[in-house]
Amino acid sequence: MTGKRRLHMKKTIATCTLVFVAVLGLTASGMAEKPVVLKFGHIFTPTSAIHHTVALAAELMDHRSNGRLKMNIYPGAQLGKMLDQVEGTKMGTQDLTVTWGIDRFCPEFSLFNYPFVFRDEHHLYRVLNSELGQKYVKDKMLQRHGIRIVGMIYHGVRMLTTNEKNPVTKPEDVKGLRLRTPDITGWIKAWQSIEANVTAFAWGELYMALKQGIVDAQENPLASIRSMKFYEVQKNIILTGHIIDYPFVMINDKKFQSLGKEFQDILVKAFEDVRYYSVGLTKEEANENIKFFQEKGLNIVTVDREEWRKAFSKAPDLFKGGREVYNKVQAIY
């Protein structure tokens, strides 16, 4: 082989090596930059405070991870009804969801989930993030279902609404009232204890059920009453404030473990930060919503909440060990 041919071959080999290294580098770079994309589903409308809060969490995750951790959101029950989405999170067909109604998965949650058990939203948050909440709720969801609770989003206090034929001011007025509630054991039993005629069915079916007179009444936070347009098929909003709605953000634990500590911390911190946003936004919207309903011609009924509290005072005794847990809850400040 001549010197020129030998030199030419060395150049060719060097060139090929450089091209290979460059391609390998680009491939590795591309792989490193490919983001982790989480799938988050919920039942609330795209205009709801819950959805805005989840969207803000997604923005924070994206920003704090430099685009490496993203979250696609599917609102409006696109991924199924409320309990179906909890099941989907358990099975891994979606990564995350947000809901308050978990007692079908964690019966012990009923010990914390009935009217007037908490003094206010701050008390609720402290209780469910205490050793008591860890023992009865968070650990049970993780051990039984592989679902990790990573945050909470404030949704406001729940109010009773009724049609024109069924005005309500006192607890005894709900006797025989055809009331829809979510499929949540504590709520169903509590309303039945004051003789309401309770039925539970899916959120997406509620508007038509009210319109067609299948049920007379329902209960939800003001924001949901507005976003779902229940004001079109109800006449009275009774300001009972009987339940503080503070849904859990839940993630499939296998997915959570696969994220690694950096992304885990980013996700948990994002939902902790947006919790404050949800409290402020929901409370700000509450006054606006009352004015909106008044303009729509609805009756806004102020009630003696202490009278309602007393009516539900035996609710802890509806559950085994309920009174003991109730006393522990009240001891937390």
Image: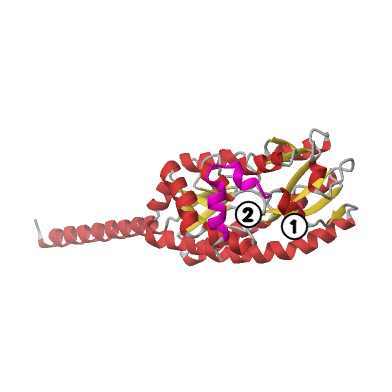
Q: How many numbered badges does the structure rendering display? A: 2
Q: Quarter-wise, where is residue 59 in the image? A: bottom right
Q: Position of residue 189 (x, y in %)?
A: 65, 40
Q: Which residues are magenta?
A: 313-330
Residue labelled with disc 1: 306
**Of discs 1 and 2, which sits in the foreground?**
1
Q: Position of residue 84 (x, y in %)?
A: 57, 38
**Secondary structure that dominates the magenta span:** helix
Residue type at mark 2: give it.
Val
Q: Is residue 49 magenta?
A: no
Q: Position of residue 1 (x, y in %)?
A: 8, 56
Is 134 or 154 nearer to us in this picture? 134
Amino acid at dot 1: Glu
Q: Position of residue 237 (x, y in %)?
A: 82, 51
- Residue 82 vs residue 61, the one in the foreground: 82
Q: How is the image coloured?
A: secondary structure
| Closest to the observer, 305 or 239 | 305
Taking the image as drawn, is residue 82 in sight? no
| Dots 1, 2 in contact, CB < 8 A | no
Q: Residue at x 67, y 43 (%)?
A: 190
User: Of marks 1 and 2, which one's residue comes earlier in the chain?
Assistant: 2
Q: Is residue 324 magenta?
A: yes
Could you classify mark 1 by the number of other residues whose Cα lies within 10 Å: few (under 14), some (14-19), or many (20 or more)?
A: few
Q: Quadrant of the C terminus?
A: bottom right
- Disc 2 crowd rating (10 Å Cα; few below 14, some 14-19, many 20+) is many
Q: Give me the residue at 47% from left, 46% from top.
A: 141
Which residue is farthest left? 1
> Is residue 143 shown left or right of residue 97?
left
- Residue designated by label 2: 117
Q: Residue at x 50, y 59 (%)?
A: 129
